[in-house]
Amino acid sequence: MTPTIEAVGVRKRFGEVTALDGLDIVAEPGQVVALLGPNGAGKTTFVRAVATLLRPDSGALRVAGVDAVADPRRVRRLIGLAGQFAAVEGAMTGRENLDMVARLFGLDRRAARAAADRVLRQLGLEEHGDRLVRTYSGGLRRRLDLGASLVGTPRVLLLDEPTTGLDPRSRIELWSVIRELVEQGTDMLLTTQYLNEADELADLIAIVDRGRVVAAGSPRELKARAGRDVVEVHVHDRESVAAAARVLAPLGVGEPRADAATRLVSIAVDSGSERLLESVRALAEQEVAVEDIALRRPTLDEVFLALTGTSAARPEDEKVTSP
Amino acid sequence: MTAAVVQAPPGAGVLSSLSAVAKRSLLKYRRTPQVLFVSAVQGVAFMLIFRYAFGGAIESGTLSYVDYLVPGVATAGVLFSGGVSAVGIAEDAGQGLYDRLKSLPMAHTAILGGRVLADTVLVAWCLLAATLTAFLIGFRVHTNFFAGLAAFGVVVLFGMAFVWVFVALGLLSAANPQAAQGLGFLVLPLSFASSAYVPVHTMPDWLRAIAEHQPVTVAVNAARTLTQGAPAEALAGGTAGHFTLLAVLWSIGISVVFGGIAVARIRKR
Ligand SMILES: Nc1ncnc2c1ncn2[C@@H]1O[C@H](COP(=O)(O)OP(=O)(O)O)[C@@H](O)[C@H]1O
Ligand SMILES: [Mg+2]
């Protein structure tokens, strides 16, 4: 079958900045693809290219087989975009917002009304549909914005950081909405800075760094690819964190990671079970107060670190910034 | 294929795109009474200030002072109401509205065209408030009803041209509402160096050369001659027909140039 999105060597420069540096990706029908990368990696630029908002300098970009550079108007009939900021009008009701978008998709009055009703139902927004959007919470606005991108029954939905800026509860609600859409068969390209979000939602994760895909695969494949097991120690008190890190350092590969707040120290190791025993012994000898010690598979966070050399954001780290 | 085959929607033509986008802005204005109130108050306040602060200090030939002043103040007023557009455009751009609209299979010229239509309605509203005030403080149309209506139309058209100017400037000020706000002051020199408040023959020669020919003077003269007839034509040095034609041409010219810049800007990708 024709891929929903097919990008080959897509490049885009803004003056001195190379935002996309030969990005390749293929999204098959029935897949949710997550572009995972730090701020400035080029995620938004790629989404904007797919959405025909900007023209790549070079490379090929097709959406459901249609050339996004040569035939943008046809691509626009196939996509739904929910950008980084919720683009809904506060002085209109939820229903009116959806209705406007439906009219702009070329639906007549009746079909537009039906589409708005369908989307309100789909996103569980029926009871809010006739309220002015300026009375909505941030989570509801995002949900409505997602709805607006669904009005044209798109072949592929483009979601640029759909949950950035939401509180944890709204984030989880939006995830379940997105999952329902996936179950109904909507193909999706989403971007995120959050590993757990990509892990939760995507079939295919493409890790993007400095404008290119540095690794791609299912969450499981990516974890396996980074290879090494991790010895993770939960120490008794903050003072023991540094001591544990010192003790573990010679046993592992690379530097240990120590987090005073959670009292967790972890280190990547070869031949896991042997090193686990050695770790237990060494910690006991040095009388480091340990609550818990375990061997586990790497998290996506560690995969990310291994592949890009920078740490990805977690929702908890997020600073509230106003646009 | 097993999945339901969904027909891709056709996309909207120019007219339905224009009406959907204009409707959005109009609903926004109607449901934000501050906007309607402020723009009406602005129209009223201009009239009152110029009527009473400047008193009769202006030499206006055989025209009564009020009849001279009102067409000028009304025309200058619509320039200022265009400033709202610059701010609104910059706000919309900052909130990602244009990304959403540009990703839709609609006529992209209508993204701005619809906005300008709605803002022109706002200009007409502001002008209506100013005109009603003018009648209360002693202004009269000394020609006939239809000439008066034509004057209203010419001023609204001229206002629309300046909405395009502000839309273009708002887009160029790159999603920055504060910068856009500052642009409003650009119309100050344009309105003062015109026949809006004082006859141009009272100005120093160098200024007069500019003032006589610039579009604000032309539009003011059109409104003044259309509403006041012969005495105004004598003062302005041309017939109502002459100034009306020129004002319409200026309005079209300004709209085409700045509309062209704005549309090219929004279609760029
Ligand atoms: N319109 C633009 N003009 C100039 N530079 C831009 C523009 N858009 C993005 N960039 C730059 O391109 C790089 C990638 O940006 P972006 O695609 O927004 O990254 P992400 O969405 O992953 O955070 C960044 O360095 C950013 O500053
Ligand atoms: Mg981004």
Image (cartoon, coloured by chain):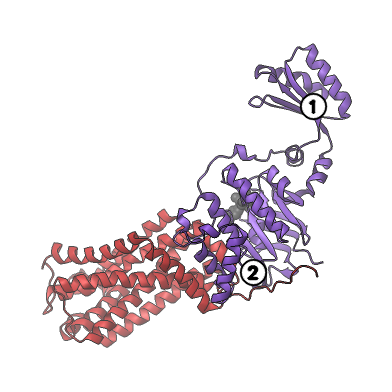
Quadrant for the C terminus of chain B, please: bottom right
Front in this rendered view, residue A171 or A267: A171
Residue at 73% over, 70% down:
A66
C-alpha span from label 1 to label 2: 50 Å
In this orientation, does residue A309 appear? yes
Q: Is residue A287 left or right of residue B196?
A: right
Q: Colour of chain A?
A: purple
Q: Is residue A141 left or right of residue B39?
A: right
The answer to which of marks 1 and 2 sits earlier in the sequence is 2
Q: Position of residue A241 (x, y in %)?
A: 69, 20
Which chain is painted in red?
B
Front in this rendered view, residue A16 or A195: A195
Dot in front, 1 or 2: 1
Q: Position of residue A322 (x, y in %)?
A: 50, 46
Callout 2 secondary element: helix
Callout 1 secondary element: strand
Disc assigned to residue A294? 1
Q: Position of residue B265 (x, y in %)?
A: 52, 67
Quadrant hosting residue B254: bottom left
